[in-house]
Every structure is written in structure tokens, then in C-alpha cells.
Image: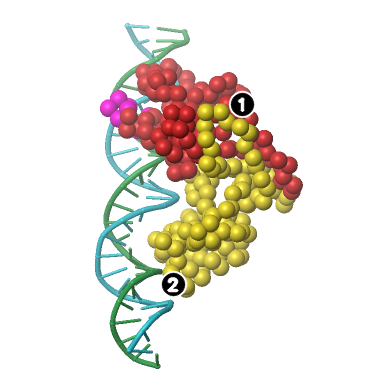
Chain colours: A red, B yellow, C green, D cyan
Amino acid sequence: MGIVRKTQSVQIVLDEFRKNSTAISAVHLVTQLSTKLNKSTIYRILDKLEDDGVLHSFMGKDGVKRYAKCQNCNKTTHTDNHPHFQCTICGKINCLQVNVSLPDIPDYSVTSYQVFIQGKCKECL
Amino acid sequence: MGIVRKTQSVQIVLDEFRKNSTAISAVHLVTQLSTKLNKSTIYRILDKLEDDGVLHSFMGKDGVKRYAKCQNCNKTTHTDNHPHFQCTICGKINCLQVNVSLPDIPDYSVTSYQVFIQGKCKECL
DNA sequence: TCTATATTTGCAACTTAGTTGCATTAACAA
DNA sequence: TTGTTAATGCAACTAAGTTGCAAATATAGA
Ligand SMILES: [Zn+2]
Ligand SMILES: [Zn+2]
Ligand SMILES: [Zn+2]
Ligand SMILES: [Zn+2]
């Protein structure tokens, strides 16, 4: 349903995304903020921020959900569609501002797709 | 470590992949085969069949692991690299035998990537 | 075919990510 | 300032997957 009240909890969660440019997992936030916020609160806030187009989420190879800041989305239009890159050395996951286009696929009509890439990031090369 | 003995349990699991051309989740096999095999046995067999290059696995959008038959892999060489397509109507997930190529990505060195696509399949169009 | 041995299986208990119901707390509009 | 309603904390729960160990079984060699 999206965020209605700008509570302290919401600010605390948003601060984590301001500090970090990389994607953050729900689990990581839960341990990171364990002294300040309850687990359920964090999951619920992430959910709402996604509804509002403030964050977007994707599934890591490990089956753990991660969140990252959206660039140009809002409550009604979610346009962020880009690959995510995980460095196999440092483990960080970043949004890539590049366009991946699919070839024609006979017998199927495509409505959306996700690309997840592994390799080494600039710092670890 | 891969399969060493061709047990009945292994045959039962392989039969499910012979019957189905679509990808199958571990959870689905566990419920489907609940009268014949134990949960742990199924997870362990899937793991070994993947090591052997008989099956490959990937993560669904729901964070549930799925398995599908490999075409040309074996114990030493895993070459299967293709997108997976989930129909939003019937829910079935299929391997697509098409090639997706990435654009050049500056500052990153790519070693592997996965593509997961949503849309409608031939039967549901 | 029989037997020894090592692999595989079942079971129960555990871990980890995420969810839910409900009573309490806190935004915020009036 | 206060009443209303959203947001929070808590504890208990679900669901996917893992693990240790004792019992079962596949297979190689006698
Ligand atoms: Zn790195
Ligand atoms: Zn992103
Ligand atoms: Zn379909
Ligand atoms: Zn496949």
C-alpha cells in the first residue's frame, strides 16, 4: 500500500540506502539495524518503499532478496529495468545502467526479464 | 560429489524429469514423491545430478530453486547457458535454446550471467 | 552366490528467510 | 491538544533447505 507516515523507522531504513550505493539484502538490514528496529518492521518498510517506487528488489543467486534505490520510479510508474552485477571477490551487488536487449523468441511473448551477472568489479580487478 | 550408485531413488527422481519437459522445483518433487522418497534424499540426489551435469539449477523469482535437464553437459564440463522463461498464466518454466549476448560493460569483467524472462507461452497465448 | 564395505537413505531435529495476528505506540490532521 | 489510524514490536509461525546419525542397500570381490 505504500508509505503513509514519515516515521523514524522509515528514515533509519532510508539512511542505510543513502550510505550505501550497493544493493542491500533484507537480512543484512535486519542484523545491521537489530538494535534500532524490529525484523517485521524492516520487511514491511522495504515492501512499502518498493510499492512507492523508491526501492526496487531482485532475487540473488542465493535466494535472498535484495533492494536498491530506484532512479526514476514513482508510485504509479516503475521503469527501472537493468541488470544487476555481483562481484565474486567482494560480494557487492550493483545496478548496471546499461541496456540488455533480448533476441526474438519464437512461440513466446515476453513482458519482462531480469539479468543477473557475475564477475569482478573495478575495485577487485 | 556426484552419483556413485544407480539406486532406485535416483531412478524415481530421473523419471520425473523424463515425464516433464519443464523445469521442476525441489519443493514440487518433495510433495510429488512424498510417499516414495524422503525430503533429504531428494535434495541430495538433485545436488549430485547437478554435479554430474545431468541437471542444472536456477533460482525462480520466488526464491525457490528449480532444476531442468542439461543438453550437453557432463561431470567436467557444464556448458548449458540459456535463459529461462516463466509463463505468467500457466506458471510453467522452460529452458530457451536461444543466445542472449550482453553489451560491453565498462569497469566490470563478466564471467557468467543468468537471464530470467516472464510472459506468455505458446499454449497460453 | 555370498559377504564385506562403503554409499545411500530415512528420520528427526535444526537453520534461515520471511510472514502474521494482535496489542501497544506514535504520526498527524483537525 | 487530542482522536483517529497507521506503524511498530513481539512472539509465534511457515516454508525451504540442511545436518548428524543409525539403518538399509548397492556393488565389488571372494
Ligand atoms: Zn568487488
Ligand atoms: Zn537495480
Ligand atoms: Zn503458459
Ligand atoms: Zn535451463
Residue D11 horizontal/vertical position (percent): 27, 39
Same chain for labels 1 and 2? Say yes or no: no
Q: Residue at x 56, y 59 (%)?
A: B73
Q: Which residue is denoted by mark 2 in the rendering?
A: B5
Q: Quadrant of residue B42?
A: bottom left
Determine if residue B23 is in view.
Answer: yes
Q: Residue placed at 72% from the left, 45% from the top?
A: A105
**x 42%, y 19%: residue:** A18
User: Which three-letter amino acid code belongs to the residue tagged 1?
Assistant: Thr
User: Where does the image place residue D12, in percent across and percent down from the top left?
Assistant: 31, 44
Q: Which disc, if any, is residue A23?
A: none
Q: Horizontal placement of A64 versus B104: left or right?
A: left
Residue B110, percent across and down?
53, 38
Q: Position of residue B44 (x, y in %)?
A: 42, 61
- Above or below for B74 versus B60: below
Q: What are the residue bounds of the magenta stretch?
A: A33-41
| Residue that numbered label 1 is attached to | A79
